[in-house]
Amino acid sequence: MAETLPNLPNIKPALLDLPTSEKLEPAGAMDHPPRILMLYGSLRERSFSRFLTWEAARILEHFGAEVKIFDPMALPMAGSVPETHPKVVELRELCLWSEGQVWCSPERHGAITAVMKNQIDWIPLEMGAIRPSQGRTLAVMQVCGGSQSFNVVNTLRLLGRWMRMFTIPNQSSVPMAYKEFDDAGRMRPSAYYDRVVDVMEELVKITLLMRGRTGYLTDRYSERNERARKAIDRQIEKL
């Protein structure tokens, strides 16, 4: 391979991948149900974000997904306890298990709740060579106490990008949530309910589409270049 590329002198040709359809063929057997982790952002007994999460979980299970919902109760504030705390270990193991995630938070003072952010703050970008969030699909939802807002889903999208997740285009925002759920916590029929179905359907489709491909999709030139530099540095140190 040439040492330099025409018009691209800053690129190392040996480290540059040329994407093809063949390279996007799924790797390994992928016949298990899609594994979806769900996080919600409220500790209230009558929590509409939890109700919405449960409703979405029922839809996902109908689509054939295996769903696990993390209970944020008793999760300490990030940094206040060692990473060996049982709730922290549980959350991180669920993240590693998941192929896709759903994040659902109430809107409080125009933003996500501390309960929601605390869960995300406990998920590290890296655990040694393992990345608990990178390559996972993500769907975002919010519940509002008043008129419809998109502050929370916009913030969750920002956090998902920061966590190197693939956030699907569709999303759900439920205004005046106290009107949308009955006494048993079940969501009433409405256009908002239909949107939740749309979001979960899209999440399953995109998760299935990406399975077996995330390793290739998240392999980056900059990281290959950095690894190559570190390998050279290690060789120099041995001299």
Image: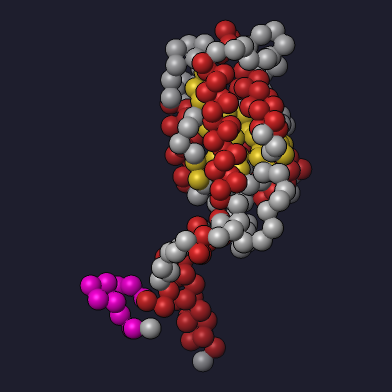
- Say whether residue 110 is magenta: no
In the rendered structure, which segment of residues is drawn in magenta? 2-12
Decide: is 86 above or below 170: below
Most distant residue in the front direction: 22
Numbered label tally:
0
Residue at horizontal 66%, vertical 20%? 51
- Residue 120 appears in the picture as rendered: no
The secondary structure that dominates the magenta segment is: loop
The part of the image, by quadrant, that contains residue 65 is: top right
The part of the image, by quadrant, that contains residue 222 is: bottom left
The part of the image, by quadrant, that contains residue 184 is: top right
Q: Position of residue 61 (x, y in %)?
A: 70, 32
For residue 160, side relative to residue 14 (left or right): right
Q: Position of residue 208 (x, y in %)?
A: 60, 46
Decide: is 139 above or below 180: below
Q: Position of residue 48 (x, y in %)?
A: 62, 18
For residue 4, side relative to residue 198 (left or right): left
